[in-house]
Image (spheres, helix red, strand yellow):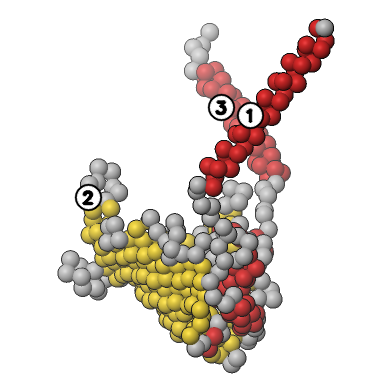
């Protein structure tokens, strides 16, 4: 019975396969049981504190409709920097200091922001003393909903120096930071690129479902401390003061495996009913090379919710004058600044082909006339010099 024999062999093979599969599954489960798995970590402490800080911070931040002010910050870089010059070896001792004054204006409903900075470089001698020689460099920018005007650093004290250029960029090219030349006063009210509300509410909502590592929150008086780590990215601590608009007054941490430590401290002042920055200190230390960058910032003037004239957000506030060069970095064209028709809202100007066509036709016509005149002149000269018959 060939058919029965075939069926019997098939059933026997299937049964053996099923037993083998079950055996492998049991073996795999047994192996997994030998190794503990990491369950999603839960936030330690009262997570309601995160919502409290986030809501009070947002209420204070949202109360800012316009903001004008003046800031001075002193930046210093010192230590044994790696020698990155061609053929360089070892390290180069560096000790540099700059003093910068910044005027800024923020109009939240209009979505416009302007800053203009004057940086004074004060070199130090070999003994670490600040020298008398200094130069002033101007820079600034205007950010709107559609783009970013930028004026790079230009020598304000040398008349023969080339005039500054107005560079048109994408709005995403405005990048604030602890040591960025793009000054932003709201930076000192945030956690780096994150708004406090978004950052804390993320942990408040996701702490019980995400494997977020070791996270804790605690309170002592008006101070709420939120800590992330230790982990691969190190330890990061943020301290918020409910008595200062729930703003971050201490933001510090280390880079874990990266040999960098960061320390940020801030204080705030109350203008009317709103808390805004008064002082800030930032220190970044590379422990491998013992290189330090630090910046001390002081808000000399804060004016809140007062009307701001439209001319404050004009290229003239950045030092641009008539006929200065305008470069549109987005499309690679340039033209001269005309105060009568400034580049409103960073509209892309496209070059018309008509002027180039006309110029080309004129050049061809001029070339043709010159060639005809040249041939006629040569023929006349040859005829005049011919010998008589």
Residue at left 54%, top 75%? 45
Q: Earlier in the sequence, mark 3 or mark 1?
A: 1
Q: Quadrant of residue 313?
A: bottom right
Residue at left 59%, top 87%? 274
* Between 47 and 341, the one nearer to me in the picture: 47
Q: CA distance from mark 3 to mark 1?
A: 100 Å
Residue 49 visible in the displayed image: yes
Callout 3: helix, strand or loop?
helix
Q: Viewed as shown, does residue 319 lie left or right of 252?
A: right
Residue 159 visible in the displayed image: no
Foreground mark, 3 or 1, reads: 1
Q: Earlier in the sequence, mark 1 or mark 2?
A: 1
**Residue 284: percent from the left, percent from the top?**
37, 66
Kindly identify which residue carries mark 2: 90
Kindly identify which residue carries mark 3: 374
Foreground mark, 3 or 2, reads: 2
Foreground mark, 1 or 2, reads: 1
Q: CA distance from mark 1 to mark 2?
A: 63 Å
* Between 226 and 389, the one nearer to me in the picture: 226
């Amino acid at each position: 019975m060939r058919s029965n024999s075939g069926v019997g062999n098939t059933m026997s093979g299937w049964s053996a396969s099923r037993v083998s599969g079950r055996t492998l599954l049991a073996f795999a489960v047994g192996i997994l049981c030998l190794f503990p798995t990491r369950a999603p970590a839960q936030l330690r402490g009262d997570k309601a504190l995160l919502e409290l800080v986030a809501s009070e911070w947002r209420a204070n931040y949202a109360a800012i409709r316009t903001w004008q002010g003046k800031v001075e910050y002193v930046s210093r870089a010192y230590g044994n920097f790696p020698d990155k010059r061609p053929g360089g070896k070892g390290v180069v001792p560096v000790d540099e200091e700059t003093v910068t004054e910044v005027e800024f204006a923020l109009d939240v409903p209009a979505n416009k922001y302007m800053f203009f900075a004057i940086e004074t470089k004060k070199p130090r001698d070999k003994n670490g003393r600040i020298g008398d020689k200094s130069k002033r460099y101007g820079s600034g920018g205007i950010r709107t909903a559609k783009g970013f005007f930028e004026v790079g650093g230009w020598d304000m004290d040398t008349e023969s120096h080339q005039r500054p250029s107005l560079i048109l960029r994408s709005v995403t090219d405005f990048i604030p930071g602890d040591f960025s030349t793009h000054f932003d006063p709201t930076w000192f009210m945030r956690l780096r690129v994150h708004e406090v509300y978004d950052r804390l509410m993320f942990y408040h909502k996701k702490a019980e479902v995400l494997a977020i590592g070791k996270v804790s929150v605690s309170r002592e008086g008006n101070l709420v401390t939120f800590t992330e780590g230790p982990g691969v990215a190190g330890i990061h601590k943020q301290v918020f003061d409910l008595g200062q608009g729930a703003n971050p007054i201490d933001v510090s941490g280390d880079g874990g495996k990266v040999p960098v430590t960061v320390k940020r401290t801030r204080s705030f002042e109350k203008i009317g009913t709103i808390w805004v920055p008064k002082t800030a200190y930032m220190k970044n230390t590379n422990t491998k090379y013992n290189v330090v960058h630090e910046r001390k910032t002081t808000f000399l003037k804060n004016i809140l919710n007062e009307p701001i004239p439209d001319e404050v957000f004009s290229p003239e506030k950045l030092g641009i004058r008539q006929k200065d060069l305008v470069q549109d970095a987005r499309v690679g064209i340039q033209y001269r600044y005309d105060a009568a028709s400034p580049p409103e809202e960073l509209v892309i100007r496209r070059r018309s082909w008509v002027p180039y066509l006309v110029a080309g036709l004129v050049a061809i016509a001029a070339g043709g006339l010159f060639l005809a005149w040249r041939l006629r002149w040569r023929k006349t000269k040859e005829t005049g010099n011919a010998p008589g018959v």
